[in-house]
Image (cartoon, rainbow, N blue to C red):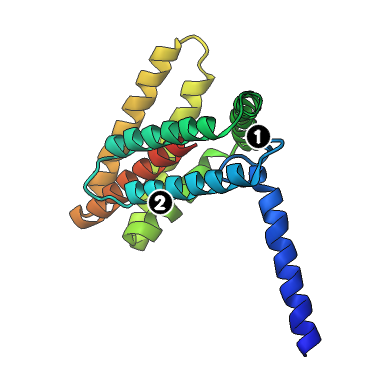
Amino acid sequence: MIIALLLGSFQIALAQSDTTKQFGKRRDFSPVMTIDNLTNDQKTKMEEIRKEHLEKRKAIENDTALSSEQKMEALKKIRSEKRNKIGEVLTEEQRQQYKQQTALKREHHKSVKAGKKVKTPLSANERALRFTDKLDKIVGLTEKQRDKVFSSVVESELKKDDIFKNKSISREETGTALKELRAEREKELNRILSKKQMKLWNEALAAKKEKRALHKSVN
């Protein structure tokens, strides 16, 4: 048992040592970023910068007194502060490497997002069913409401397909048509749902919008 405990402690120490050596590969900086020839002092300072940044980010994200726009601005500010502090820790050669790999990180995220967008398109019925299920989960639809929502959304999705297929209209006209279609769907939902259900749905939409905005600002 004693030997097993000693071996376990030795393996933990090795893992910690390896983590220190691979500091530049931490997720907080980039999944593909490595910085050469970091001294122990540099590693310590960068770890402090990382922890400080995470604490500030968490505080901003959890601050209910800030609006979505204010949170975005605050997150941009602390990201800039983090980059400046890292630059002060690194040598000129390391700073150039950091800038290059930061650019690679941005390209990496763009390619990942582009890859996620390449999916087999869903039919109008499938999209309507997915929307109806999501709405039902949030507001709790009756069977009658489900049928009405599903039929309404199928019609809306078919109209959306027609808008995208219409190559004779400009991009601005397409945007206007989609905006009008969303307004029609909102009006129809107001007709089908109760006031309490609409409130729950609008709150869910607002929360999703804020979460998306924060995620975009952090990345």
Q: Position of residue 105 (x, y in %)?
A: 62, 32
Quadrant where the N terminus sits is bottom right
| Residue 115: mark | 1
Report if residue 184 is visible in the image. Answer: no
Task: Please provide percent x and percent y for residue 122.
Answer: 58, 40
Depth check: give the residue in front, 140 or 115: 115
Residue 215 visible in the picture: yes
- Neighbor class of circle 1 (other Cα within 10 Å; few <14, some 14-19, many 20+) is few
- The residue at 49%/9% (across/down) is 168
Comparing 40 with 172, the one in front is 40
Q: Is residue 161 left or right of residue 116?
A: left
Separation of disc 1 and disc 2 at Cα? 31 Å
Q: Secondary structure at mark 1?
A: helix
Furthest-left residue in view?
A: 195
Percent position (x, y) of residue 137? 40, 60
- Residue 153, image quadrant: top left
Q: Amino acid at mark 2?
A: Glu
Relative to 174, 118 lies left or right: right
Q: Earlier in the sequence, mark 1 or mark 2?
A: 2
- The residue shown at (35%, 48%) is 61
State if disc 2 and disc 1 touch (CB < 8 Å): no
Is 64 rendered above or below residue 73?
A: below
> In terms of image quadrants, where is residue 14?
bottom right
Q: Residue at x 63, y 35 (%)?
A: 112
Type of residue at label 1?
Gly
Front disc: 1 or 2: 2
Secondary structure, mark 2, is helix
The residue that disc 2 covers is 55
Question: Mark 2, residues whose alpha carbon is within 10 Å: few (<14), some, or many (≥20)?
Answer: few
Relative side of 125 to 192, left or right? right
Q: Can you say whether 152 is above or below 111 in the image?
A: below
| Label placed on residue 183 | none
